[in-house]
Amino acid sequence: MTDWGQAGFIGGVGFGTVLVVLIVLALVVWLAGIIINRTHRGGEKPESK
């Protein structure tokens, strides 16, 4: 017989883990974008023709 309490717990832990991993990845990409913009902001300006 299926223990639905344990099945729900395992599903909840899996869902929570995926959510945490996605949040961490979003923060890493956001911080990388900020760092890249700061390093390129002081560079040369594009030439207009």
Image: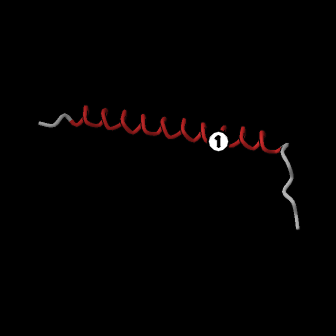
From the image, tell me which residue sits under label 1: 30
Name the residue rendered at 78%, 40% in the picture: 38
- Quadrant where the image shows the C terminus: bottom right
Q: Residue 26 falls in which quadrant of the image?
A: top right
Left or right of 24: which side holds 31?
right
Residue count near mark 1 (Cα–Cα under 10 Å), binned few <14, some 14–19, many ≥20:
few
Q: Position of residue 21 (x, y in %)?
A: 48, 36
Task: Assign a secondary structure to mark 1.
Answer: helix
Residue nearer the viewer, 30 or 37: 37
**Amino acid type of the residue tagged 1 in the rendering:** Trp
Q: Residue furthest left?
A: 1
Q: Nearer the viewer, residue 24 or 46?
A: 46
Give how far across and how far down residue 47 sits, in percent: 87, 60
How are the residues colored? secondary structure
Q: Residue at 29% across / 37% down in the picture?
A: 8
Between 29 and 23, the one lying in front of the other is 29
